[in-house]
Image: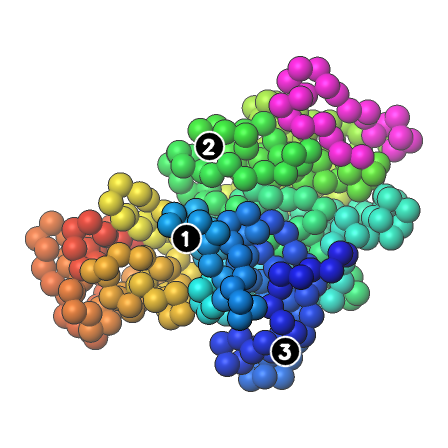
Amino acid sequence: MAEITFGLPIGTILDNRYEVQEIIGSGGFGITYKAYDKQQNIKCAIKELFPRQLAIREADSKTVSPIKKDDPKQFEHSKERFGEEALALQALKNVDGVVNVTDYFEQYDTCYFVMEYLDGVNLRQLARANGGRLGWQELSYIILEAGKALSDMHRNKLFHRDISPDNIVYTKTKQVKLIDCGNAKELARTNNDGLSVFLKPGFAPLEQYSSKRSQGTYTDVYSFAATIYYLMTGNKVPDAVERLTGNGYTPLSQYGYATYISDAIDKALEVDYKNRTQTIDELLYDLMLLDKKPETQPSNAKTESGHSKTLGKQAIMEVHVGSSLETYILPKNSCLMVGRSPERCNIVINVGYVGRQHLEIMYDDMADELYVRDCNTRNGTFINQTYARMDTNKIMKIPFGTIMYLGGKGCWIRVLRR
């Protein structure tokens, strides 16, 4: 890796807790550091928001500021996306195959989140260390483990949208972990309006080239299949747009791989998503890595014996700010804080009349009940069309579908059960 001259100085202390030890990765969007957590006495990884096309490091070698100081909107949008990545990863903390995020904070005018330290390499590095490509025996294990993590994401109503060899890590203890979920979006959306266009040519399907095209589990299927193809051949699949003009790729069968593997990847790489393999489990089955054909709907989980089971109830929270809408999976049996403070809130709403810590929400899945608490806010929380103000600092049980206005009618939340 080329020396990175724009990172934080080694030894920098972040959040009065984390000591930066080494730069271990860099992309156009951020820098990842190996660090030491002085409170927990463990190694960790910290990702810093540093979009190189939008930001510079100030003379103190720490503070980050937008290049265009008179027009910081793009940099502020990057902060929002960075927070989305942290939230997406935190929502998946119980998924073994996704890197675990443990902390999020702002410092030096930018954002950071803390992750478990993964002692290993990404799959692009692993392939390079093995002559440019991986054999099926080693790769099949990695495909299965990464595929199971992706399926778990989908069952949690999220899709990744950035699967590539760079975003799958293989550790020294043979764990397989998905990283960099900055593009992850909710399957619970009623439409895909507003899905941002961020992609890696050669790994992104056609539908990702437009914010208006339908996206879903099949989007990750294409990227995952393109990743597998690259790891097996050392070559990328041509860009999806180029494939529309007849620019094809060499099937895996011509590289000497079994016909069933080649056919499975071909089906998963269909340009038209309607003709494509729809779920990761279907792809794993076609690759003969699952014993029994899965259900076509990703909403049905599998027991180890292969028999389907219905997932438990799930609470989906809608956050409306003006004309914008974001949806989040409400974690079960744990408190979630909503407010303006990035340091203290799981969901940040940057609106002046919303309190720094405004509303605490908890979904009890055993009792199937929803509990909320207004955190002694100045502007209050109001219920439904009657606009009755909630008591402050009092835990209340409310029905699903209740509209809760945070400080003003321009920002409201409701939780639905699915």
Against 218, residue 124 (above or below) is: below
Q: Which residue is mark 2?
A: 211
Residues under labels 2 and 3: Cα distance? 41 Å
Element under disc 2: loop
Give whichever of discs 3 and 1 has the lower sequence position.
3
Q: Percent position (x, y) of residue 14? A: 53, 75
Tell me the crowding category of disc 3: few under 14, some 14 to 19, or many 20 or more residues within 10 angstroms, Cα based.
Answer: few
Q: Which residue is mark 1?
A: 69
Q: Pick out the residue farthest to the top.
A: 245
Residues under labels 3 and 1: Cα distance? 28 Å
Q: Nearer the viewer, residue 377 or 335?
A: 377
User: On the rendered structure, is 73 left or right of 320?
Assistant: right
Q: Nearer the viewer, residue 63 or 388?
A: 63
- Residue 383 in view (yes/no): yes
Q: Are marks 2 and 3 in contact (CB under 8 Å)?
A: no
Task: Say which amino acid is labelled 3.
Answer: Gly
Against 97, residue 249 (above or below) is: above
Q: Which residues are magenta?
A: 235-257
Tell me which corner region of the image, top left, top right, bottom left or bottom right, holds residue 35. bottom right
Q: Nearer the viewer, residue 27 or 196?
A: 27
- Residue 99 in view (yes/no): no
Q: Pick out the residue farthest to the front.
A: 59
Is residue 109 rendered magenta in the image? no
Q: Nearer the viewer, mark 1 or mark 2?
A: 1
Is residue 244 rendered magenta in the image? yes
- The dot on residue 11 is 3
